[in-house]
């Protein structure tokens, strides 16, 4: 279990930015991932505790699998017309 503030602190160090990401930025992003891959990531929004239910490699594999199932015309949030 990790807390969103721990992840935010690591992100701030990596980005060399003391303002971003905030604990809430992380919570919102993790909540989105939890909707996409609930079998490997979950979050308690009330406590902002993050639960990783698999190894990092398995989480990555599961996310990539889900992303690969998105139709081409819907990738990157842009609906493309087929010609």
Image (tube, helix red, strand yellow):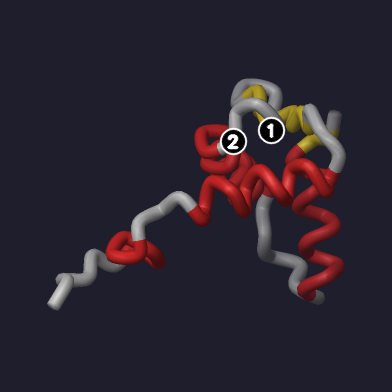
Could you tell me which secondary element the residue under label 2 belongs to? Answer: loop
On the image, the x and y values in percent for residue 14 come to: 83, 70
In the image, 82: left or right of 70?
left
Residue with the mark numbered 2: 37
Q: Nearer the viewer, residue 82 or 45?
A: 82
Q: Residue at x 83, y 46 (%)?
A: 56
Pick the quarter of the image with the C terminus: bottom left
Q: Nearer the viewer, residue 75 or 5?
A: 75
Q: Residue at x 65, y 23 (%)?
A: 44
Q: Any mark on residue 66, and which? A: none
On the image, the x and y values in percent for residue 69 come to: 46, 50
Q: Residue at x 76, y 52 (%)?
A: 8
- Rendered position, 80 above or below 51: below
Residue with the mark numbered 1: 41
- Rendered position, 6 above or below 70: above
Could you tell me which secondary element the residue under label 1 belongs to? Answer: strand
Q: Are marks 1 and 2 in contact (CB under 8 Å)?
A: yes
């Amino acid at each position: 279990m990790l807390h969103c503030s721990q992840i935010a602190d690591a992100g701030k160090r990596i980005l060399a930015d003391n303002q971003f990401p905030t604990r809430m930025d992380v919570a919102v992003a993790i909540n989105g991932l939890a909707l996409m891959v609930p079998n490997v990531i979950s979050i308690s929004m009330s406590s902002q505790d993050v639960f990783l239910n698999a190894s990092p490699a398995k989480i990555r594999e599961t996310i990539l699998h889900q992303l690969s199932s998105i139709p081409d015309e819907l990738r990157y949030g842009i609906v493309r017309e087929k010609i």
